[in-house]
Image (cartoon, rainbow, N blue to C red):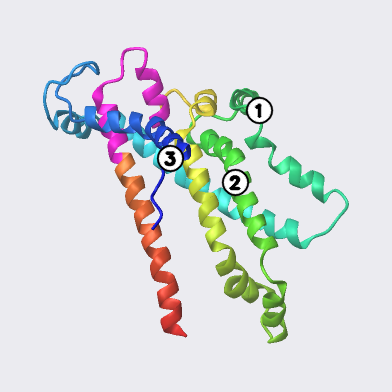
Amino acid sequence: MKKKTFRFSNLYLALVMLITYLPLIVMVVFSFNDSKLFVSWEGFSLRWYQELLGDEDLIEALGNSLILGFLSCAIAAVIGTLGAIGMVRVDFRSKGMIEYLSTIPIMVPEIILGMAFLAFFSLLDLPFGMVTLVIAHCSFAIPYVFMMVKARLVGIDKSLEEAARDLGASPARTFWDITLPLIMPAVLSGCMLAFAMSFDDVVISIFVNGATLSTLPIKVYTQIKTGVTPEINALCTLILVAVILVMLCSRLLGRLRPHSEEEGR
């Protein structure tokens, strides 16, 4: 029987995990701290969660961020998916250049995009607010969906669509019954990534945001000048719990799906 030996890789992995998750653990712990200061622990309390529920401005900012994220993801899902399908099925000389140009918004620094959208919307005399935020966020959300769906389409067997067409299915019916179910995991993955980037964006949102509208990242950023209260820790803890629950549900559904397919066979 071989003895388990200590490896440097285990220490390295533990160090990386510690650096990654220690700030999150500290945030969660101090969200239950009765003190307003981050340097001392004065006892367990749900005070900041109660004040969070009564903070209308913070709740409104969270709602605006959720609405903005869902709208930008929905639009990006449609445009990115259709763009990926068209790019895979159509062959022309400048195809590679267009594919490269479609990914530029996620490579250009956010401050450059923010200034460009500020000048563009000012030129169009478009009122700054939710509309400008959605347009700006769609600009960097679409490439995520586009890349995910395009990579998925490359790996799909084209004979499946050809078989459906041979059996009399129309192009629309083939898309809804064959293509869309096959690329749906990629669409959802791209949407989740796009939503995370939209929900987290500060720089672009500051440039194209209106005076009467505030998103959660902007709200937190502006509070840094006066000091971030533990309410932010409480809110971030709730968001972290929601993310963990979504990940657990996704993993559970992923495990149940193979079993249901086997039973169906």
Image check: 255 left or right of 230? right
- Provide the major secondary structure of the magenta segment: helix
Q: Quadrant of the N terminus?
A: bottom left
Measured in 3D between alpha carbons, the distance from the residue under mark 3 to the one under mark 2, in whole angstroms, is 33 Å
Q: Identify which residue is drawn at 69% across, 85% down.
A: 168
For label 2, the SS is helix
Q: Are marks 2 and 1 in contact (CB under 8 Å)?
A: no
Give the residue pinned by disc 2. 144
| Camera-side mark, 2 or 1 | 2
Measured in 3D between alpha carbons, the distance from the residue under mark 2 to the one under mark 1, in whole angstroms, is 23 Å
Q: Identify which residue is drawn at 47% across, 39% down.
A: 9
Q: Residue most toward the top?
A: 226
Give the residue pinned by disc 3. 10
Can you say whether 159 is above or below 115 in the image?
Answer: below
Magenta span covers which residues? 215-238
Where residue 189 sits: x, y (%)?
Answer: 52, 53
Taking the image as drawn, is residue 59 in sight? no
Give the residue pinned by disc 1. 120
Foreground pick, 85 / 8: 8
Query: As shown in the figure, which amino acid type bears the numbered disc 2?
Result: Tyr
Which badge, 3 or 2, is on the more N-terminal residue?
3
Foreground pick, 66 / 210: 66
Taking the image as drawn, is residue 249 in sight? yes
Query: For residue 237, which quarter of the picture?
Result: top left
For label 1, the SS is helix
Q: Residue most toward the front?
A: 1
| Camera-side mark, 3 or 1 | 3
Which badge, 2 or 1, is on the more N-terminal residue?
1
